[in-house]
């Protein structure tokens, strides 16, 4: 199993747990969460080394991708955690889809 599939499994499990414990958000709530998560992430401003860096990066990225998937689903955009085998590509695709529907993230 490669690291991409581990990320997919982690994201899928987190989304599944959230879906079992919460009602689906409205598009307004989902958009707000997405923007908040994106603001928290500074892709280039992480500690230079250490285990905390890796842990923080993973937590931030999973939280952002969960918000991205939830927002996309609210708008009926086809998305599945399995498509996050290459997370950067799937993020770009979903962010582009959201931007085309009036939710710019850049």
Image (cartoon, rainbow, N blue to C red):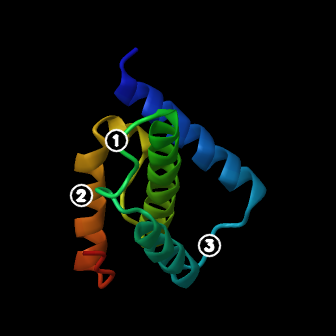
Mark identifier at residue 64: none
Q: Which residue is mark 3?
A: 25
Count neighbours of disc 3 (C-alpha within 10 A) and say few if under 14, some if 14 to 19, many if 20 or more.
some
Residue 76 position, x and y percent, is 42, 67
Report the quarter where the N terminus lies: top left
Q: Earlier in the sequence, mark 3 or mark 1?
A: 3
Marks 3/1: CA–CA distance: 22 Å
Q: Residues within 10 Å of mark 2 (few under 14, many from 20)?
A: few
Residue found 32% across the figure and 44% down from its top: 87
2 and 1 marks in contact (CB < 8 Å): yes
> Would you name the residue on which mark 2 appears?
93
Expressed as whole percent of the image width and height from the top left, the position of residue 106 reads: 25, 75
Q: Is residue 82 left or right of residue 10?
A: left
Distance from Cα at disc 2 to Cα at disc 3: 21 Å
If you read the primary sequence from the N terminus, does the residue marked by circle 2 or circle 1 appear first? 1
Q: Which residue is mark 1?
A: 83
Could you tell me which residue is drawn at 41 percent across and 68 percent down? 38
Q: Residue furthest right?
A: 21
Query: As displayed, is residue 32 above or below residue 80?
Result: below
| Mark 1 closeness class: few <14, some 14–19, many ≥20 residues within 10 Å | some
For the residues labelled 2 and 3, say whether their Cβ atoms are less than 8 Å apart: no
Residue 13 occupies quadrant: top right
């Amino acid at each position: 199993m490669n690291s991409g599939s581990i990320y997919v499994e982690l994201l899928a499990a987190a989304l599944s747990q959230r879906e079992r414990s919460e009602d689906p958000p409205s598009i307004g709530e989902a958009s707000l969460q997405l923007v908040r998560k994106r603001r928290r992430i500074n892709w280039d401003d992480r500690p230079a080394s250490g285990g905390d860096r890796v842990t923080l990066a993973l937590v931030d990225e999973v939280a952002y991708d969960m918000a991205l998937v939830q927002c996309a689903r609210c708008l009926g955009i086809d998305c599945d955690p399995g498509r996050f085998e290459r997370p950067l590509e799937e993020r770009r695709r979903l962010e582009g889809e959201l931007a085309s529907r009036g939710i710019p993230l850049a």
